[in-house]
Amino acid sequence: MSDVDNQPFREGDLAVLYDRRSREYMAELKMSGLFESHLGNLEHSEIIGRPEGSWLPTSTGHLLLVFRPTRFQYALNMPRVATIVYPKDLGPIVTYSNIHSGATVVEAGSGSGALTITLSEIVGEQGHIYSYDIRDDMLTAAQSNLKKYNPICTNVTFRLADVSSHILEKNVDAVILDLPEPWEAVDLVADSLRSGATFLSFLPNISQVSDLVEKLKKHPEFSLIKIIEVMERPWDVSGRTMRPSHRMIGHTGFITTARKCTSRPIKK
């Protein structure tokens, strides 16, 4: 989105409006569109043509601040047909999967596309994401959200398939699974990964993690198994008053990683 970020707002762009209490309102801009709230109304045409960071008055004189949505905001506000991977987990998933610019990554399932969008931006034009899901409505939602966030994206291929049955790609740099039973795909994941690459799974329940770890431990081509849980605690700072926020995003899921290695030698 770098080319878009430097341009004034255009029709079809996404915009986030902030009121005096920093409450957020996301809208897709249309020349005939109208933002309506208890603070007054604002014609979308007043936003179109303005740069990011503009202050605009509503019909009642309240000022609204307008920016394009960050990936964080878009992930939380975009249409969804399934629970998204939350922004607090997206960064660790990228870090622990060890993906990079130019990487080839297999992802399953696509869900609503929050993780797909992030992976697409990280691997860049020289990399590629192959996003699998067994539900056509999930793929449709993920494709729609990706296109709305980045209309010129060309580095994602969506596949309607089950990764526990087949994965077409070989010698990939990472496989990332957001599935309820990832242990069913471990053998095919091993065949898909290059040596040294990373397998990562995101699971909500520790019982699922236990089943996955047992499968990984028995597989001769996986090692260095690690499990983490990411917590996020925001803070409120006002003058000399500094305290943790009353609202905290606690448990969302567990990240399990393993590295692809050559087959473990059999003890004689």
Image: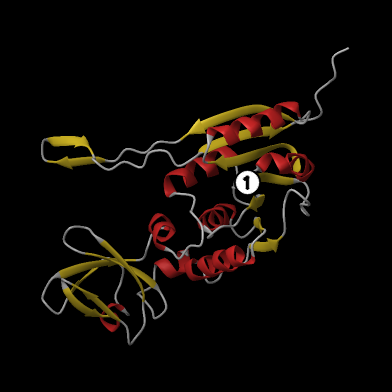
In the displayed structure, 103 sits above or below 96; it is below
Colouring: secondary structure
Toward the bottom, the furthest residue is 32
| Residue 93 makes an appearance in the image | yes
Question: From the viewer's perspective, is 57 left or right of 29?
Answer: left
Residue displayed at 19% across by 35% down:
243
Toward the top, the furthest residue is 268
Q: Nearer the viewer, residue 169 or 51?
A: 169
Is the residue marked by circle 1 packed among few (<14), some (14-19), or many (20+) residues within 10 Å?
many
Question: From the viewer's perspective, is 108 left or right of 37?
Answer: right
Numbered circles on residues, count: 1
Measured as percent of width and height from the top left, residue 100 is found at 59, 46
Measured as percent of width and height from the top left, residue 53 is found at 27, 65
Residue displayed at 29% across by 41% down:
234
Q: Which quarter of the figure has residue 60?
A: bottom left
| Residue 153 makes an appearance in the image | no
Measured as percent of width and height from the top left, residue 262 is found at 80, 30
Q: Nearer the viewer, residue 218 or 7?
A: 218
Measured as percent of width and height from the top left, residue 194 is found at 75, 41
Toward the front, the furthest residue is 207
In the displayed structure, 225 sits above or below 192; it is above
Residue displayed at 22% across by 78% down:
42
In the displayed structure, 183 sits above or below 73; it is above
Q: Which quarter of the figure has residue 197?
A: top right
Q: Amino acid at mark 1?
A: Leu
Where is the C terminus found, in terms of image quarters? top right
**Residue hosting label 1:** 177
In the displayed structure, 161 sits above or below 194; it is below
Q: Secondary structure at mark 1?
A: strand
Question: From the viewer's perspective, is 42 left or right of 88?
Answer: left
